[in-house]
Image (cartoon, grey):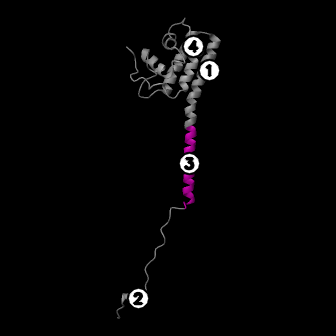
Amino acid sequence: MEQIDPAEIPLRDIHLPEPISWWPLAPGWWAILGALILLGFLGWIYWRFKKNAQQRFVAAEIERIRLAFANHNNHHTFAKDLSMLARQVALLHGSPKRDEAGAVGQSWLDYWQQRIPETEIDPEELAKALTIAPYRSGETLNVEKILAAFKAASSNKSARTSPAQGLGPSS
């Protein structure tokens, strides 16, 4: 048998094809990208709707309290309705780590005095509306001014200062 010299054999090197490029993207990738963008946009719309739903709820409750007061003209019932709304707003806007809605006494007043500017309502009027009038009949309140202050405070995203730190039952 005759020996073949490998240098004399007419062989050529193996040439591999070019590596597959990421660009242009395949149609499936465009579909996934479009679906992600659509989902992000729909999530943003949902988030905005939910965020504005709280403001719409509070505005509707304030209007309901205003109309109820116009019908019964009872300051005590107005104060009880306002107290319930104030607790609901504290739950909506409060921190989950602190119990703003469960605060009583001075800590409850401090929470609302931080949310409502003094230019909106007199602190004594606010104290009377939140701590005295819901529990004692015969108190007279400036209903329109109180409702306007609560409407401004509930639509206000940030309070004048950070919420009170040690909220809880006062001793």
Residue at (60, 15) in percent of width and height: 144
Q: Residue 78 — which label?
A: 4
Q: Which of 109 and 54 is in front in this view?
A: 109
> Which residue reaches farthest top?
138
Q: Which amino acid does label 3 sit on?
A: Ile
**Percent coordinates x, y for residue 37 in the rendering:** 56, 48
Image quarter (top left, top right, bottom left or bottom right) of the N terminus: bottom left
**Percent coordinates x, y for residue 159 in the rendering:** 48, 25
- The CA distance from mark 2 to mark 4 is 105 Å
Instruction: Tell me if residue 35 is in the magenta stretch.
Output: yes
Q: What element carries label 1?
A: helix
Q: Earlier in the sequence, mark 2 or mark 1?
A: 2
> How would you classify the magenta stretch by its main secondary structure?
helix
- The CA distance from mark 2 to mark 1 is 97 Å
Residue at (57, 42) in percent of width and height: 42
Q: Are marks 2 and 4 in contact (CB under 8 Å)?
A: no
Report which quarter residue 151 is drawn in: top right
Q: Earlier in the sequence, mark 2 or mark 4?
A: 2
Image quarter (top left, top right, bottom left or bottom right) of the C terminus: top left
- The CA distance from mark 2 to mark 3 is 59 Å
Q: Which amino acid does label 2 sit on?
A: Ile
How crowded pointer 2 is (Cα within 10 Å; few <14, some 14-19, many 20+) is rated as few
Mark 3 lies on residue: 37
**Percent coordinates x, y for residue 142 in the rendering:** 57, 12
Quick check: 16 above or below 116? Answer: below
Mark 1 lies on residue: 63
